[in-house]
Amino acid sequence: MRSLLSITELSVEEIDGLVATAKDIIAKPQKYAEICRGKKLATLFFEPSTRTRLSFEAAMYELGGNVLSVSSAASSSASKGESVADTAKVVSCYADIIAMRHPKEGAPMVAAMNASIPVINAGDGGHNHPTQTLADLLTIHLEKGRFDHLTVGFCGDLKFGRTVHSLIDALSRYEGIKIVLISPEELKLPSYVKNDVLRKKGIEFTQTTDLLAAMPELDVLYMTRVQKERFFNEEDYLRLKDSYILTPDKLKTAKPDLSILHPLPRVNEIAVAIDDDPRACYFKQVRNGKYMRMALIMKLLGLTPEI
């Protein structure tokens, strides 16, 4: 039995395999429509989520399976003080696989250590969000046809953004990747990510506070919101939240085939006017997340379609 807690647990070959499976699901959905018949996914979300929870649930339904859902800590036995370990043991009696989101870093790991079924980390604090990274990777591959030899810009909150950290980790394993880090000084990428991932793997990277200056060289621009819930005081949040807003004017020097990604939810960091730009990929990203979660659920349950 295997769980997925971090994107680093997947090899390059496994990521490529999941991308290939997701593309096959897109091309031949009927081939996969009954593969999880009789299987149950438990979605344990102890932190607010719309996209991720619904994406997991839609993925399981489209594979022919069923869903057991907990959408908040208040509606679970956690409100009575039940531990994550005990919750995992209990839910293992009801379901075949768990998707868990939790505000505490490491909670899905505790669940995986105590569950008798696979656990997928659907986001733990500011730590990891591997299935969002899989959605990001599929989007990049569908738009660019490759993962190597790309210049990828990350803009906004690079300090607290778990999706940024995970995607940098994943992309750093491919050849010819260049990373451009665009953020206010207060929200720069943490030193441990720069040292343990970028410098350790010899990835070329630059840091800047100027989005416009970086724009012409980018193949992919990954925008993020400045997350209020990750700040310790509101004054810092209010000062920085509008630091980087992407508008049509700022795209004038961008490549015609730039791909604009965003993990969502968007607040105002991407102007609505950009939604109709063919370079906007963030709603495609949402759809792609469902296909990658379908591929991952099948992998962890050891299921393959009949040819």
Image (spheres, rainbow, N blue to C red):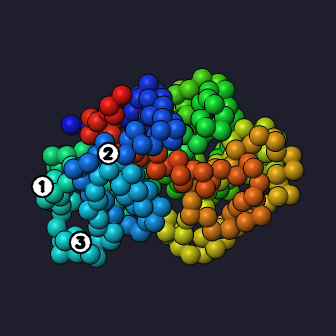
Q: Earlier in the sequence, mark 3 or mark 1?
A: 3
Q: Residue at x 53, y 73 (%)?
A: 233
Indicate the quadrant containing the N terminus: top left, top right, bottom left or bottom right. top left
What secondary structure is marked by label 3?
loop
Q: Is 38 in front, or is 15?
A: 38
- The residue carrying mark 1 is 93
Residue position for label 3: 76
Instruction: Work out whether residue 286 or residue 209 is closer to the camera in this orientation and state it.
Output: 286
The percent position of residue 104, horizontal first and vertical second, equals 34, 60
User: The residue tagged with tag 1: helix, strand or loop?
Assistant: loop
The residue beneath circle 2 is 34
Quick check: 201 above or below 217? above
Q: Residue at x 66, y 26 (%)?
A: 149
Q: Nearer the viewer, mark 3 or mark 1?
A: 1
Alpha carbon distance from label 2 to label 3: 30 Å
Q: Residues within 10 Å of mark 3 (few under 14, many from 20)?
A: some
Which disc number belongs to residue 116?
none
Under mark 1, the amino acid is Cys
Mark whose residue sits in front, 2 or 3: 2
Type of amino acid under label 2: Glu
